Image (cartoon, rainbow, N blue to C red):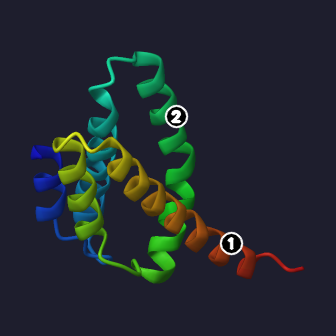
Amino acid sequence: MRAVYKLNRIVRDQDDVKSLDAWERAHRQFHLTLIAGSKMPMLVNFCDILHNLNDRYRRIFLVKRGGDRNVAAEHSEIAQAAVARDSAFACEKLREHIQRTGTNLKQILSNQIPA
């Protein structure tokens, strides 16, 4: 809950590089905290690598659109489900959260690449 609290208190201002960097660090920490309790270092490392690979593309979307939904509410819902040990609900909400980002990225990138 500390990670989501810290993340949701940071104002992400598109015109302020420091606020964007602070939000990105807290965002990474939140998502890695979700899986840190697994006690599976290889899984945590793999997810960190996937986050790094995805991050550059996610930032393209954020620069173009600045976000399209209430991400703070999504993060809070995921965190509450994890704390409640409702793994099925937490996984479903996390899947939706990640998939929505992927869908947004795909749309932005496909519009930039000529057919």
Label 1: how many Cα within 10 Å (few below 14, some 14–19, many 20+)? some
Amino acid found under the numbered disc labelled 1: Leu
Q: Is residue 92 above or below residue 73?
A: above
Task: For the C terminus, give its image quadrant.
Answer: bottom right
Outermost residue on the right side: it is 115
* Residue at figure coordinates x 46%, y 82% from the top left: 65
Q: Quadrant of residue 18?
A: bottom left
Q: Quadrant of residue 85?
A: top left
* Residue at figure coordinates x 16%, y 43% from the top left: 83
Residue bearing mark 1: 109
Q: What is the secondary structure assignment of the residue under circle 2?
A: helix
Amino acid found under the numbered disc labelled 2: Ile
Q: What is the secondary structure assignment of the residue under circle 1?
A: helix
User: Residue 15, position in %: x, y?
Assistant: 30, 78
Q: Which mark is residue 49?
A: 2
Which sits earlier in the primary sequence, circle 2 or circle 1? 2
